[in-house]
Amino acid sequence: MKRYLSLLLAISIVFSCIFFMPQKSSAATADVRGFVTRVYQVVLDRNPDADGLNYWSNSLTSHSKTAADVVANFFFSQEYKAKNKDNTAYVNDLYRCLMGRNADTDGRNYWLNKIRMGVPRINILAEFVLSTEFTRICSNYGVTRGTINTQYSTSRYTGIYNYLDRMYSKIFGRNVDSAGINYFQSRILSGQMNGCQVAYHLIQSAECTRRTPDNRSYLNMLFDAIRDYTPSESTMNKWLTRMNIAQTREQVFAQFANNSDYLAVCNRYGIARGSYDAGRIVDPDRPMIALTFDDGPATGTDRILDVLQQYRQTATFFVVGTNASRYQSTIARMARLGCEVGNHTNSHPDLTRGSEAAMISEIDTCNNYIRMATGHNATVIRPPYGSYNAVLQRVAGMPIILWSVDTRDWATRSTASTVSSILNNARDGAIILMHDIHPSTVEAACQVIPQLVAMGYQLVTVSEMAMYRGGMAPGQVYRSIPK
Ligand code: ZN
């Protein structure tokens, strides 16, 4: 105990010498020179050269530099860099220079942990500068303390670290490593990556794919990492069904990431969420309508495709072979946009009035033109005049699609009447009949597509609608496809 006390006494004497001795000096210049000398000795481990001592002392005396500027210059000098100090040595040096004492274990670990979290050395120095110890040392030497401006605050770095660590643990089942911090931190700080991009980068990686071999494990991971909750079994089943029917992992991810749950997660860590675009996604829980256009393609068809493309909607075009042969590129574009190309026969006869061979020939010839443009046959058929019989049902080889809403656009040739017919009869599951060979109908379609979207309808192809609602069978007749 006695030895301990004398040790304490010895330490306090040494400290008094370091801190308080210069105060006793009457000349302020001597104090400033003492401060600079001390920084040389502690940081660079040597006595100052005359030029250096004069330069830094004069800078402090003239107030062109603060004490914070001086220590920053020393800690980030080439001479200090060349010493290749590791993080522990750096923190020890900070303690000795700015707090005037050796680091205690807890304190050192606290700062080392911040460095491990990706906080730059300059930020650590900036925090030491603000300490009461350094403030006191500066006042003892009669120098202005000042502050160090850092590009980003320490809390910004730790926020990003905590966000990454959360994402890594939920997606990979492990802590974020230094490679991950290095990769993502700079990209998040520069705005090159937002929360959606970081999450997708992690989720589409091989490591995540290995951990989520099936849809259920993938959804469990997504709910935990992106939505931040554990789903009920019925919610899980809803998403499993979507994935089993059509939706890709990327599309499901997009719906999760764009949900406000993930916005809340990102906000917690100061991360900009952004949004994720996985293309057009059909939500089976929202109402759908199938717009259908017969007898084309024609000159106005591409205008309808323009609007569908702009609003990311689709429609079904029941083309006739005689026009299909002339508008091959329009049909190819329909397919590219996800629209459905249906068979409306080659020359538009009433199929029930001809032979079975004529019926087959009409269908096959039209299919040939569709196949030339798209690489495959039509997926659905609409017989001209909606006229069908048992023979057609037997030989069609595709679902036979009629309609629930007849706009009578061919008779009225009125844009206004076609638009109001559609809006008055719009309901979930409707199949709407129009003809894209009439300019009045093209105009009506261009007007009505944005309006239906604004009303909350998803414009889908007939087969898309059926896909989410139990499917269709070849030869069967469909007038609408309700839930
Ligand atoms: Zn027709």
Image: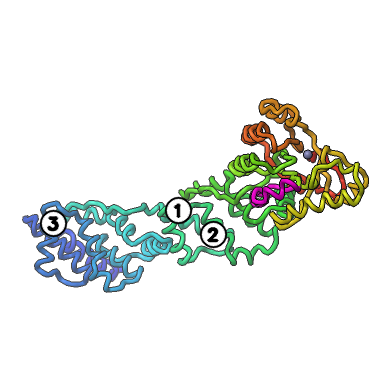
Neighbour tally class for label 3: few under 14, some 14-19, many 20 plus, Cα within 10 Å: some
> Do we see residue 303 in this rendering?
yes
Mark sitting on residue 201:
2
Locate residue 457, reporting x and y percent. 68, 37
Side of 215 relative to 14 (left or right): right
Q: Residue at x 70, y 28 (%)?
A: 413
Distance Cα–Cα, label 3 vs label 2? 49 Å
Residue that label 3 marks: 59
* Amino acid, disc 2: His
* Amino acid, disc 3: Ser
Neighbour tally class for label 1: few under 14, some 14-19, many 20 plus, Cα within 10 Å: some
Residue that label 1 marks: 159
Locate residue 126, reporting x and y percent. 30, 56
Distance Cα–Cα, label 1 vs label 3? 37 Å
Give the quadrant of residue 312. top right
- Observer-side mark, 2 or 1, equals 2
